[in-house]
Amino acid sequence: MNYRHVYHAGNFADVVKHAVLARIVEYLKRKDKAFRVIDTHAGIGLYDLSSEEAQKTGEWQGGIGRLMEASLDAETASLLNPLLDAVHAVNQEGGIQRYPGSPRVTRHLLRKQDRLTAVELHPQDAARLKEEFAGDFQTRVIELDGWLALGAHLPPKEKRGLVLIDPPFEQEGEFTRIAARLQKAHARWPGGIYAIWYPIKDHRAVDAFRKALADSGIADVIDIRLELRAPSSEPRLDGTGMIIVNPPFVLQKEMETVLPPLARILGDNGKGRWSIERLAAE
């Protein structure tokens, strides 16, 4: 377990992932009834962008750094404000010194009746996550394999909510594992919203993953993608994707508004590409 997200925190993939996450949470808040977000690979919650690790890659500068400096039209700004507010909340002294991971973004957006279950396997990261949310009765931090959480914690007692699956992709066969575990989780809780992040690096593996999901029998699946550049023969991160099962009915339209400016802001030479494709009908 040598993966550390601090090297990548706030990069373009985080921006897209957390923009989608924030829009789904905002949708769930339209009803007064409580909901739960289950974050299966939660990390440490908050990342120091001045740390040696973050400075070594500087990836955040091409992600949240660009977005915070960009000029946005009113509609795009309105849709991205929940994420940007979460970033401002951990940088109250100004600038961008810290970046909130998915549990911190989620927690910033929750109402008093909503709950967060943050799951992290790595002992050191789980300990830091527990410190981050110490005393917070709305957040439960569990040191556990996130894949096991899909069985043990579904469905949540609220019967409403989101499962965010954001594995580090440090092991072989991660795409196959996601497809298989998602089928089992969906069978336990077919009414839940599932958001699965994936890297666009091995394009053949991505194509096979998308086909597996399309053939899985799970209904109502969309694929949201943003690519920095055209596919490369080199093994590099060309883009980022989010699979959404049971997407909110407003999500596609919102992403059709948000993705074009994000592609321009985050893409290489302002020429990023985006797409939203339905993999399975409702």
Image: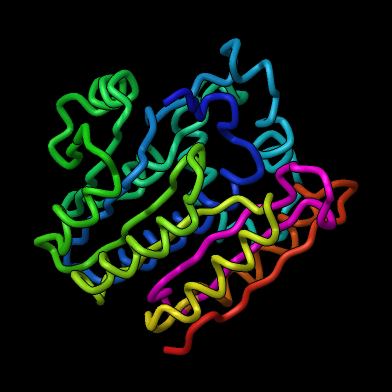
Instruction: Tell me where residue 226 appears, x and y as whole percent.
Output: 69, 59
Instruction: Tell me where residue 114 appears, x and y as whole percent.
Output: 20, 53
Residue 75 showing in the rendered view: no
Judge left or right: residue 105 versus residue 184. right
Residue in the picture at 17% in, 60% down: 154
Q: How is the image coloured?
A: rainbow
Q: Which residues are magenta?
A: 222-249
Quarter of the picture holding the C terminus? bottom left
Query: Measured along the vertical axis of the image, is residue 247 above or below residue 150?
Result: below
Quarter of the image for residue 32 reads bottom left
Query: Measured along the vertical axis of the image, is residue 129 above or below residue 180?
Result: above
Instruction: Tell me where residue 243 appears, x and y as whole percent.
Output: 50, 65
Query: Measured along the vertical axis of the image, is residue 152 above or below residue 124?
Result: below
Instruction: Tell me where residue 274 appears, x and y as whole percent.
Output: 72, 65
Pick out the residue farthest to the right: 269
Pick out the residue farthest to the front: 172
Judge left or right: residue 263 versus residue 214. right
| 48 inside magenta stretch | no
Judge left or right: residue 256 versus residue 158. right
Query: Measured along the vertical axis of the image, is residue 186 above or below residue 92?
Result: below
Quarter of the picture holding the N terminus? top left
Residue in the picture at 15% in, 64% down: 155
Residue in the picture at 58% in, 77% down: 253
Pick out the residue farthest to the top: 52
| 227 inside magenta stretch | yes
Residue 195 showing in the rendered view: yes
Count of marks placed on residues: 0
Residue in the picture at 37% in, 54% down: 164
